[in-house]
Image (spheres, grey):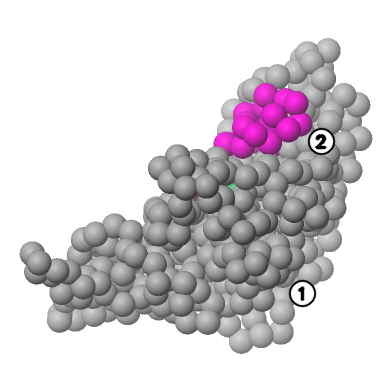
Amino acid sequence: MSTAIKLPSDSAKVAARDLVAGFDVERVRSDFPILHQRVNGHQLVYLDNAATSQKPKAVIDAIVRYYEHDNANIHRGVHYLSQRATEEFESARKVVQSFINAAEPREIIFVRSATEAINLVAQTYGRQHLGIGDEVLITAMEHHYNIVPWQLLCEEKQAKLQVAPINDRGELIPAEFERLLNSRTRIVALGHVSNALGTINPIKQITAMAHARNIPVLVDGAQAAPHVRIDVQQLDCDFYAFSGHKIYGPTGIGVLYGKAAVLEAMPPYQGGGDMISSVTFEKTTYNKLPHKFEAGTPDMSGAVGLRAAIEYLNRVGIENVAEYEHELLTYATQKVSAIPGVRLIGTAKEKAGVLSFIMDGVHPHDIGTILDQEGIAIRTGHHCAQPVMQRFGVDATARASFALYNTKEEVDVLVRGIQKVQEVFG
Ligand code: PMP
């Protein structure tokens, strides 16, 4: 396989402990201990990366190092370890800031996950701005996580959830989307990349349409962050949410980016320690950003692990990852769609990381079970996107999703696995 993808010139300056110059997938694979095991008698082929990705040794080591050397509660301690843990945590915030090109560190709020980020915005910005008859505009390809928080809000406020349609390839129809924007729309919330279809949405175009009507835009970036360069200033979105565990970091840590002025004007989310500046029984005043939205002891080791994951991605180069994965997806799309009786669900022109498919006469669950016997991990089901399934007239799909450590050889194993499924059900 071709591995002739070059690192960007500035990465030579970074201490590349884990990577040699050039995108060497075998070298990348050697950084991920979990990949090197046999499952059901076969070399593991892990193609469930959209659910969660595996962790490089650099991330695992960073978490161990944090607990062995730096752990203390942050922000309030005068002692040495507390200050060092605070520095670690705040330096992770700066690494996230530059990863998504936010203007300031205080625009980065550490949360538990993308899910919590979306709920935070719905319960603060949403509750503050929605009234009876107002509207929230989402799309027909959203994950449940970007549907249900808005439904809860709309129910409470007697507001309306509007849903922009998608075409048969699984793409947003910008003109239809624009038609649904109106004077009652209070917020737009959409995924950057669909977890069920792989579609990359034209976020910049959407934010321009919404901002022309002074409507803020929340982007669910859970599936985009591992695959594409994110520049929140260039996208001009008001909020951007993603989870650490999908970008090679630990579980339990996620990020909400918000434009400082928008976050400043929002009420707090959860109450507790760290989010206050003073408390009396009569009146509490709130801390400044970002702490206003970070009540209680945060996931310090998670932030340190996320920093290590981003530094790892930076060393590989996200553009290299995007290019390599694009090559892999193109190869997999050709191979899998050429198998008679297999239909791809989600054939957008702009796609990342995901290959969803169904097979004549075989339930996706059975596909997943037989592939598992071959050591191949894929996901089957509705992928927390039941409305997408309804749109395509299916109950479920089989989904292979790719990461920077997957190879064309693994795609070949997947293809042979699918052929085996056909033999079993033939
Ligand atoms: N949005 C999308 C598009 C997702 O795929 C997921 C995870 N499957 C989420 C949001 C939620 O991420 P998490 O479970 O990490 O909160």
Q: Amino acid at mark 2?
A: Leu
Q: Quadrant of residue 169?
A: top right
Asked if ligand 1 lies within 8 A of label 1, the reply is no
- For label 1, the residue is 6
Viewer-closest of 27 and 420: 420
Point 79% across, 24% down: residue? 359
Residue 16 visible (yes or no): no
Q: From what the image shows, is residue 224 above or below residue 23?
A: above
Q: From what the image shows, is residue 326 above or below residue 82?
A: above
Q: From what the image shows, is residue 257 above or below residue 364?
A: below
Q: Position of residue 404 (x, y in %)?
A: 67, 57
Point 56% across, 50% down: residue? 135
**Residue bounds of the magenta highlight:** 378-399
| Residue 270 in magenta stretch | no
Q: Position of residue 161 (x, y in %)?
A: 57, 44
Point 25% across, 72% down: residue? 286
Q: Residues within 10 Å of mark 2 (few under 14, many from 20)?
A: some
Viewer-closest of 33 and 157: 157
User: Circle 1 — which element?
Assistant: loop
Q: Residue furthest left?
A: 281
| Residue 388 in magenta stretch | yes
- For label 2, the residue is 344
Residue 287 visible (yes or no): yes
Q: Residues within 10 Å of mark 1 (few under 14, many from 20)?
A: some
